[in-house]
Image (spheres, rainbow, N blue to C red):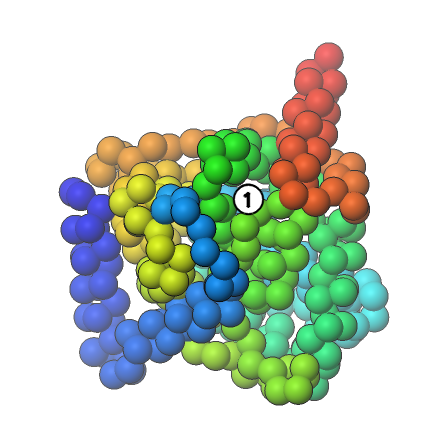
Amino acid sequence: MRCGTAYAAGVEDVAAAAKTAAPDVLTSYRRAGQASASAAHTGESSVETSAAFFDVDNTIMRGSSLFHLAVGLAKRKYFKAREISGFARKQVKFVLSGSEDMEDMASATEAALSFVQDRSVVELEGLAEEIFDSEMVDKLIPGTLALAQGHLDAGQQVWLVTATPRELAAVIARRLGLTGALGTVAESHAGIYTGSLDGPPLHGLAKAEAVRALAAAEGLDLEACSAYSDSVNDVPMLSLVGTPVAVNPDAELRAHAIANEWRIRDFRRRARIKPYVAPTATGAAGVAVGMAAGYALSRFSRR
């Protein structure tokens, strides 16, 4: 099955579900994707027409980046630790199964928004920078970072595409020296979060819509682009590009990838990165230093 055909099949599946759910679900997905692309687009022109799109959770990073953010915020007394008990239960399920539950994703995102309602956007962005160093660096996956570095070395744009809030996704992308990030857009007025989303979480078909909108804004040729993910929920995004790659795939995505002759990369047995990425590392150095630390520690651990 060709990529375009798989994407069309994904749209049909969602459309069928829409008939029994809400009549405007496809419009909501499209709205979420367009909002994310609009927030991420820099307006700068580029002669490069190819790019790589990476999912974050269990692709770039072990577990849920949203959960790691919640833990970091709790440690900083942003809210009480008991308030993330629901996150913890879903995180265990997420890590052990390697799959994403649509209802868990939506409820976790909504719960996170309730925590930041009436809080400053600038404040959360600053905390996200700290939390990346303390809670996330040791969960980065060296093998996937090497793939991202390969695209950067080829002069291509590299974007993260994730259901996690856009502010956190942007921090992760910036610290790794990537081009940018497409994430769930939380509404804010005068720099203060309202507690509402601009459309549903950037998940499933919404990711494909975001990539499509960004490609139009950036002048990208999707057939010349690549996409990487671990979850069958991202088949619409993977099917949109010329080179889809299943990374650390769940069982359903692995089967789909084999059936469609997609590449499969599995880094789950590799050593994780330890927190030795310098806080000042920027640009390609963010990826390179993280990779170097991970592989060096991996070799040391085998001695």
Q: What residue is at 46 percent from the left and 70 percent from the top?
A: 38
Where 189 falls versus 272 (above or below)? below
The x and y percentages for residue 259 are: 22, 37
Q: Is residue 50 left or right of residue 163?
A: left
Decide: is 134 above or below 216. Answer: above
Report which quarter residue 227 is drawn in.
Answer: top left
Side of 260 where 169 appears, left or right: right
The secondary element bearing badge 1 is classed as: loop
Residue plotted at (23% across, 63% down): 11
> Percent from the top left, x then y, of residue 261?
24, 33
Q: Quadrant of residue 28?
A: bottom left
50 to 261, vertically: above or below: below
Locate the C terminus by quadrant. top right
Number of numbered markers: 1
Q: Residue furthest top?
A: 303
Q: Which residue is mark 1?
A: 60
Residue 268 visible here: no
Between 189 and 220, the one nearer to me in the picture: 220
Q: Residue at x 28, y 82 (%)?
A: 24
The three-letter code of the residue at mark 1 reads Ile
Q: Position of residue 156 (x, y in %)?
A: 46, 41
Q: Quadrant of the N terminus?
A: top left
Q: Residue at x 78, y 57 (%)?
A: 130
* Mark 1 neighbour density, 10 Å: few (under 14) some (14–19) many (20 or more): many
Q: Position of residue 183 (x, y in %)?
A: 51, 63
* Residue situated in front as seen by the camera: 177 or 43: 43
For residue 67, side relative to residue 255 (left or right):
right
Please, is residue 62 above or below residue 207 in the view? Answer: above
Q: Is residue 214 visible?
A: yes
